Image: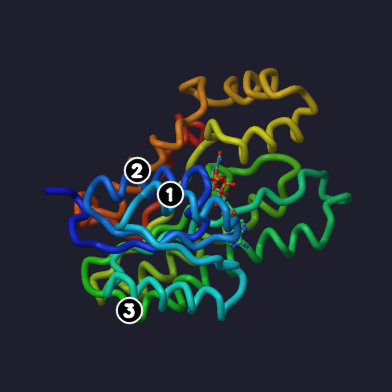
């Protein structure tokens, strides 16, 4: 018996590092997974790797029509939706506030906040009791850090959306939580670290490891296991929670 047997999930940014690690974990536990993102070659190869239990569509998380179309396509394909993961993300600019570009701020909020809002708006009407909504926030949705005004603001705002929906959907037996990964060993994070420190990748990794009590980055599979916990009935009494998976960084 898999922990997600017969269930169907949609993941925005599903073709990325954490998205694909999560999709692999879900399929291994019996779920079908719909990957919704903007990188077509990765969507195609990701779904092919996952096999017959996967489907995909190019979907800009900030575009209401495209998000609705992806939700409808997932429902057409799988006949149900049990797990909804707002995971699409960009890092935004890394700059002091006075130099932070306004368009980068707007775009970062659009992808993370409007994107999570639109996915919930279009998917929630199709969910039944026992469904789980997960928003991928970040350790910097729980604490601040310099020079990431767009990203950290967006990741905090996702917590507000999560708390609103947890209260709103509890009467229907639908759970809503945020997950807060710390630095993950992937390209998304390494790019941020190189830009933030001005050092090469290895030196930047060492500097970041010193900020993490467990003194290392997470593997994407470690985030995926926490996603699986939130998606499955293992977390059946958990809603409105901020789950830090950050090596102790926010403690
Ligand atoms: N990597 C980390 O250390 C880390 C830490 C904390 C939180 N996060 C969050 O985890 C999530 C996944 O990031 P990741 O580390 O897998 O990086 P990633 O770059 O591998 O994945 C992000 C995915 O989002 C997709 N995407 C970007 N803009 C989009 C849009 N407008 N519409 C739809 N899809 C879009 C990209 O194509 C990509 O596949 C993000 O929300 C990120 O902020 C990452």
Q: Residue at x 36, y 49 (%)?
A: 50
Q: Are marks 2 and 1 in contact (CB under 8 Å)?
A: yes
- Camera-nearest label, 3 or 2: 3
Q: Residue at x 47, y 54 (%)?
A: 14
Instruction: Bin the neighbour count of mark 1 within 10 Å (Cα to Cα): few under 14, some 14-19, many 20 and up.
Output: many
> Picture quarter containing residue 156?
bottom right
Q: Among all residues in the image, which is located at the extreme left? A: 1
| Residue 109 located left or right of residue 4 | right
Image coordinates for residue 230, horizontal then vertical, percent: 31, 52
**Picture layout, residue 74 above or below residue 210:** below
Which residue carries the number 1 mark? 179
Q: Among all residues in the image, which is located at the extreme right? A: 99
Callout 3: helix, strand or loop?
helix
Numbered circles on residues, count: 3
Nearer to me, 125 or 80: 80
Q: Residue at x 49, y 23 (%)?
A: 213
Give the mark nearer the N terminus: 1 vs 3: 3
| Residue 116 located left or right of residue 243 | right
Q: Residue at x 51, y 32 (%)?
A: 249
| Residue 209 located left or right of residue 251 | right
Image coordinates for residue 171, horizontal then vertical, percent: 26, 76
Within 8 Å: ligand 1 and the Cβ of disc 3? no
Rendered image: mark on residue 126:
3
Image coordinates for residue 246, horizontal then vertical, percent: 47, 35
């Amino acid at each position: 018996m898999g922990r997600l047997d017969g269930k169907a999930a949609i993941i925005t940014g599903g073709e990325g590092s954490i998205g694909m690690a999560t999709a692999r974990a879900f399929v291994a536990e019996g779920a079908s997974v719909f990957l919704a993102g903007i990188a077509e070659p990765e969507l195609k190869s990701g779904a092919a790797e996952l096999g017959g239990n996967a489907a995909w569509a190019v979907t800009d998380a900030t575009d209401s029509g495209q998000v609705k179309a992806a939700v409808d396509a997932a429902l057409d394909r799988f006949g149900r939706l049990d797990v909804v993961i707002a995971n699409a993300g960009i890092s935004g600019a890394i700059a002091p506030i006075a130099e932070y570009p306004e368009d980068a701020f707007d775009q970062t909020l659009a992808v993370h906040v409007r994107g999570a809002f639109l996915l919930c708006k279009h998917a929630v009407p199709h969910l039944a009791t026992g469904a789980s909504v997960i928003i991928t926030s970040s350790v910097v949705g729980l604490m601040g850090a310099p020079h990431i005004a767009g990203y950290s603001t967006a990741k905090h705002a996702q917590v507000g959306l999560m708390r609103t929906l947890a209260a709103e959907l509890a009467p229907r037996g639908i759970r809503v939580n945020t997950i807060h990964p710390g630095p993950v060993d992937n390209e998304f994070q390494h790019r941020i670290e190189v830009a933030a420190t001005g050092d090469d990748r290895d030196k930047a990794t060492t500097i970041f490891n010193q900020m993490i009590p467990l003194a290392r980055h997470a593997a994407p599979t470690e985030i995926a296991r926490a996603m699986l916990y939130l998606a499955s009935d293992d977390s059946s009494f958990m809603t409105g929670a901020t789950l830090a998976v950050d090596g102790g960084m926010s403690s």
